[in-house]
Amino acid sequence: MTLKLITNLQNLGFTENEARTYAALAGLKEATAREIFEASGVPRSKVYKVLGRMAKKGYIRTIGGNPTLFSRISPEELTSRIREDFMLSLDEVFLELHALGPGDEAVISEA
């Protein structure tokens, strides 16, 4: 696991713990939460929460068993998913900014 990889994943929106977890899984292929925490340096008390958040985002897969195993999605899938999410957000920002006319006051509200 390299510092450059961790930094680049963080630049793509990963938290430090998510970046460390994904990088550790890249080397481990499949692993238990314990193996991930040992390889990644993510605090043991946080590793399950990080794994749950990453599974919800679709960055890792949960494999049944006792103990539960986790694996990362492929780098191709990851970069494609991040690219799609970024482009969708970029398109939405463009449309929203374009909809504001000169002199319009921007009112921040939850959508």
Image (spheres, rainbow, N blue to C red):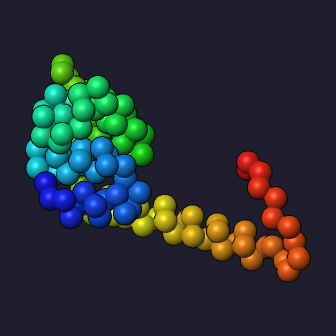
Quadrant location of residue 88?
bottom right
Q: Which residue is drawn at 23% across and 47% down?
A: 20
> x, y (%) of residue 39?
12, 40
Which quadrant of the view contains residue 21? top left
Residue 32 seen = no
Question: Looking at the image, is 94 positioned above or below residue 41?
Answer: below
Furthest residue in direction top, as rendered? 66
- The residue shown at (73%, 50%) is 111
The percent coordinates of residue 79 (x first, y second) are 33, 64
Q: Can residue 85 be seen in this view?
A: yes
Q: In this view, does 96 lie to the left or right of 75?
A: right
- Foreground pick, 31 / 10: 10
What residue is rendered at 29% in x and 25% in y?
Answer: 45
Query: x, y percentage for residue 57?
Result: 42, 46
- Counting from the top left corner in percent of width and height, residue 2 is at 15, 59
Q: Residue at x 20, y 51 (%)?
A: 23
Q: In which quarter of the image is the N terminus?
A: bottom left
Please state the total of marks drawn on the protein image: 0
Q: In which quarter of the image is residue 104?
A: bottom right
Looking at the image, the residue that sits furthest to the bottom is 102
